[in-house]
Image (cartoon, grey):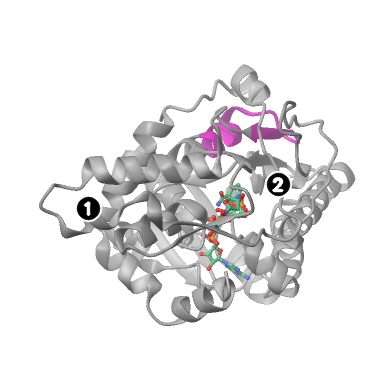
Amino acid sequence: MRTYLVTGGAGFIGSNYIHYMFQKYGDGIRIINVDKLTYAGNLENLKDIEDRENYTFIRADICDSEKIMKIFEENDIDRVVHFAAESHVDRSIRNPEVFVKTNVLGTLVMLNAARAAWEQPDGSYLPDKKFLHVSTDEVYGSLEEDGGYFYETTPYAPHSPYSASKASSDMLVKAYMDTYRFPANITNCSNNYGPYQFPEKLIPLIINNALQGKKLPVYGDGKNVRDWLYVMDHAKGIDMVQEKGRLFETYNIGGHNERQNIQIIHIILDTLREMLSPEDPRRELVTEDLITYVEDRKGHDRRYAIAPDKIRAEVGWYPETSFEEGIRLTIQWFFEHEDWMRNVTSGDYQKYYEEMYRGK
Ligand code: NAD
Ligand code: TYD
């Protein structure tokens, strides 16, 4: 039975990926989830699978080399899927250091531990061992409003401390592939949305605020463009790249779903009004009057857009969920998980929100 080591599996995309993998492979795989449980990691995300015999959670920091090495020594790991990272641009602007520690040094620790476990004395690797590094399209920088896409060959030009740290981690993975023939792939995905996303990111923040009649903060002119992908389509892409992709290659993942932030907000408001029953008192709170233009993010990238030609041609991946459907699924999930939202927005979140949006 194949054993997966998933890092950051208690976060947004990692937990969706674990759900996807158990839905797809059932008892045919084993998953070890290694997560530090930062503010973004939440074991509630995995409640419905935590009792499975083929699932293990280990609380560990990926920067803790000894602990990570030990996990590899004690388990015969076949696949690594490396999600663990600090992931929010606004936080990186305020406090870049932890981004470099986790995203750069943590990735180095993961690479060293996997290499130590898998490399043979003659420099070859044990058969069928693979490492997948989950990255972002933000490493490519920003596109003009009127054209162009990010290809796998687009030069890296990160602007935020977050994207600079992810770019550095990608470079380390590339260096390990080139220098040690380390068996890896890199995926660079566009913005994800869906269940379990922490409400510091645009879509869950807007849903949560709108349902409470709170201001909806729009940075700058609201016309920055992001290319949104439903998280389960990302999970499917990661699995397909690991199984069908060529080793040592990078694959961009995205579904040609570019929207301005302000358009996203209007779609969310329209969909909320459509989905809330007329008797629901929250329905009248959800109005365009909540939209509030605030000071722009520093160094705000104007547009991201992925060209998914390579993953479609080589791997056969394509997104299955339209944006209209994905947004409805996401909102429905938030309706059914009010406790989840209450739990993650109590305590530290309040402090975060006040500090981040103070004066905005
Ligand atoms: P997230 O912030 O929701 O989750 C990150 C997880 O990593 C959390 O569970 C956290 O506890 C864990 N973690 C953080 N530091 C750790 C450490 N030092 N040791 C062990 N665990 C640690 O992030 P996400 O949105 O799920 O993103 C996951 C990955 O996907 C990241 O690498 C991110 O760069 C990448 N990505 C995200 C998006 C997006 O739109 N969210 C798009 C493309 C790529
Ligand atoms: P975000 O979800 O933080 O993702 P990223 O910065 O990684 O793309 O932000 C998505 C877009 O929404 C980005 O252009 C910034 C903007 N934004 C707002 O306008 N208001 C907000 O409160 C947030 C969190 C983001």
Mark 2 vs 1, N-terminal side: 2
Residue 23 visible in rendering:
no
Q: How many marks?
A: 2
**Quick one: label 2, few (<14), some, or many (20+) residues within 10 Å?**
many
Cβ at disc 2 under 8 Å from ligand 2: yes
- Give the residue at the far front of this rendering: 289
Q: Does 122 appear above or below 10?
A: above
On the rendered structure, is 266 left or right of 360? left
**Badge number at residue 158:** none
Amino acid tagged 2:
Glu
Left or right: 221 in relation to 176: left
Name the residue beneath numbered marker 1.
283
Q: Which residue is mark 2?
A: 138
Quarter of the figure with the N terminus: top left
**Which mark lies nearer to you, 2 or 1?**
1
Write the residue at 68% across / 39% down: 303
The region drawn magenta spans 237-252
Q: Are marks 2 and 1 in contact (CB under 8 Å)?
A: no
x and y, in percent, of residue 230 in the image: 45, 39
Taking the image as shown, residue 137 lies to the left or right of residue 123, namely left
Using the rendered view, name the quadrant where residue 224 is placed. top right
Q: x%, y% of residue 286?
A: 30, 53
What percent of the width, then of the height, locates residue 53? 32, 58
Q: Looking at this rendering, what residue extends furthest in the top direction?
A: 313
